[in-house]
Image (cartoon, rainbow, N blue to C red):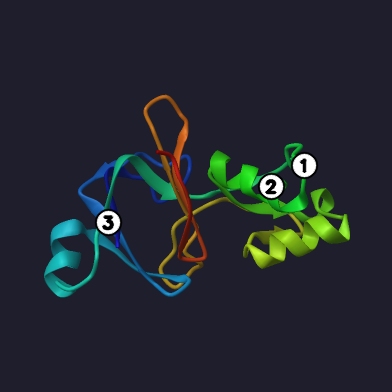
Amino acid sequence: MHAASLLRLTLDGEPRPGLAVLVTGDRVEAVASLDELTGAYPEVRVRRWAGTLGPALVHDGPLPPAPTPRERVHTLFRLGAAAVLAEHVTDPALRAAAARNEVAVLATARPSALVVRGRADLAVFGADGSCLATVVAGRLVHRRA
């Protein structure tokens, strides 16, 4: 389970206090109040984040430069992105690195949103807009120290 002081269901939605996201495998199982979820699932580990939790970003430009395709993909995670447009991953090595890391490769851009039974792509952003953590398909792939 992931919780933060504020949660956005969509990138442009108003942040709401007191909510948490329950993740099972690679899917969002529930979005509800932290108290409700911890009451229903008392054994679940709760990751509490300082910042605003919400859907991960869709990166809509070329991947940032880095020495290897794997490192290029990991630069996305440091930005809070879990998806990229297919037009920016045409190189076979880069596409393979994206697939290995479960980055969603999209034909067209789509709005980012937390949806029950949807893929668990989450990001936590600090007050300064920097990415503090990224979860891709339910797996924590980036956490700023």
Mark 3 to mark 2 CA distance (whole Å): 30 Å
On screen, residue 14 versus residue 70, left or right, reads left
Q: Residue at x 35, y 40 (%)?
A: 52
Q: Residue at x 63, y 42 (%)?
A: 75
Question: Residue 65, how many percent across, how many down?
Answer: 76, 37
Q: Which mark is residue 67?
A: 1
Question: Residue at image x 77%, y 59%?
Answer: 107
Marks 2,1: beta carbons within 8 A = yes
In the figure, is residue 58 to the left or right of 45?
A: right
Under tag 1, what secondary structure? loop
Q: Position of residue 125 (x, y in %)?
A: 42, 37
Outermost residue to the top = 128
Q: Residues within 10 Å of mark 1 (few under 14, many from 20)?
A: few
Q: Nearer the viewer, residue 1 or 57?
A: 1
Q: Residue 47 appears at what percent x and percent y?
A: 28, 55
Q: Quadrant of residue 63?
A: top right
Q: What kind of residue is marked 2?
A: Glu
Is label 3 in a helix, a strand or a loop? strand
Q: Which residue is mark 2?
A: 71
The correct choice, above or below, for 143 with respect to 141 in the image is: above
**In this view, 69 is above or below 21:** above
In the rendered image, which quarter contains the N terminus? bottom left
Residue that mark 3 sits on: 20
Q: Give the amino acid type for the residue marked by disc 1 in the picture.
A: Pro
Residue most extreme to the right: 91
Looking at the rendering, which quadrant does residue 98 occupy? bottom right
Question: Label 1, label 3: how many angstroms apart (C-alpha)?
Answer: 37 Å
Earlier-in-chain disc, 3 versus 2: 3
Q: Nearer the viewer, mark 3 or mark 2?
A: 2
Residue 127: x percent and y percent? Answer: 37, 27
